Amino acid sequence: MNRRGLLAAGAAAPVLAAPSLASAQPQILWRSAGSFPKSTDVLWGVQEMISRRVAELTGGAFQIRPFAAGELVPALQVMDAVGGGTVECGYTAAYYYIGKDPTLGFGTVMPFGLNARQHLAWIHHGGGAELMQEVYRDQGVVALPCSNTGAQMGGWLRKEIRTVQDLNGLKFRIAGIAGTVLTKLGVVAQQLGAADIYPALERGVVDGAEWVGPHDDEKLGLARVAPYYYYPGWWEACSQSELMVNTRAWEALPKQYQQVLEVVTGETTVWSLSRYDMLNMQALRRLIAGGTQLRAYPREVLAACHKATQDTYAEIGERNPRFKRVHAHWDRFRRDVQGWFRVAEDSSANFLAIAERS
């Protein structure tokens, strides 16, 4: 499947003549299961936007009805429902399913990995989409990247983290490979859907929890049950979610409709990433004004987490040849693109210095 660049959304939209599509193509109604509650308005907004834009660009001939987490299937079973044909498509994050294949983590984000721009570069132009096709095919789905949160925070804690020893025995909600990493440092990692995080933290089922960032975390009310808000979220320098489509449903879909989905998911990716950047800065100000205590993870803790991450990658690679192959490709790209970003950041700093002197 040829993935379109993000600019395709703007470039291709005028070409799609809705009235002619509606008359030339069959009427199709799909259901889209979701992993996110409606309270997370940006994530849920992506699912709504996909449905609305697909209908608009096909003159109403192609309809996708969105369902939030738990309305059709549990939040963390969306890919299973799509791959099994229970629903035609679903909106979810691949790293929720690393128990099936840890290589799925590369579809969302990997610890100490790529930021949003770098991840999108790997997926769209660095060979990532081609590598991941094989992984998704085994799950019975075609995956279309459709949203990205940008950099995430390091979670809410009931107590401060001052040393690596403070992690030992900590019950912490976290998703993806990062949970495996933290178990090496004594953390009891738990994966929970968004709706279950607040009650688990309130009742002490977990001692801490990460979700997304200031905007979503404020929506979930996490500041009311944990005073310390940590950064950086070293496990999620970005977080990509996808519209997963059942493989047979995708292959049966008219080519024009496939193109519509590719265009629309490119559009929602840009929308979600830019919207989070705008909303997070506003929410962080409110949280701090309301008493949230912002904390940085100590360098000692970050260094231990980095080592545990590299050990985890090596251990998984020994058991899983595909993970090893994809990781090697991803890691080469990471080194190259982050090298470029360091040059770009130096250039930006110089521009800023010039502007400040003028």
Image (cartoon, rainbow, N blue to C red):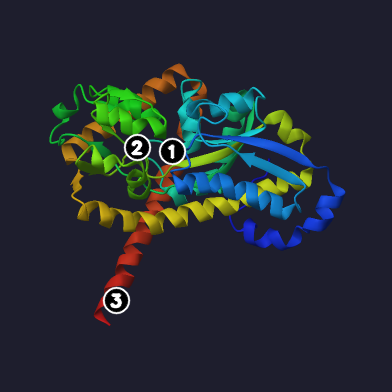
Circle nearer the N terminus (2, 1): 1
**In which quadrant is the N terminus drawn?**
top right
Please give left or right for residue 286 compared with residue 73 in the image. left
Q: Is residue 139 above or below residue 282?
A: above
Which residue matches tag 1? 109
Which residue matches tag 3? 354
Residue reaching furthest to the right: 24
CA neighbours of label 1 inside 10 A, class few (<14), some (14 to 19), many (20+)? many
Which residue matches tag 2? 235
Which one is nearer the viewer's eye here, 347 or 38? 38
Residue reaching furthest to the top: 319
Please give left or right for residue 68 compared with residue 18 in the image. left
Q: Amino acid at mark 2?
A: Trp
Q: Amino acid at mark 3?
A: Ile
Task: Please identify the quarter of the rendering in which residue 184 is found.
Answer: top left
Residue 358 visible within the image: yes
Query: Residue 10: x, y in percent?
Result: 63, 61
Which residue is found at the position 20% from the left and 21% from the top?
169
Circle 1 or circle 3, nearest the eye? 1
Q: Amino acid at mark 1?
A: Val
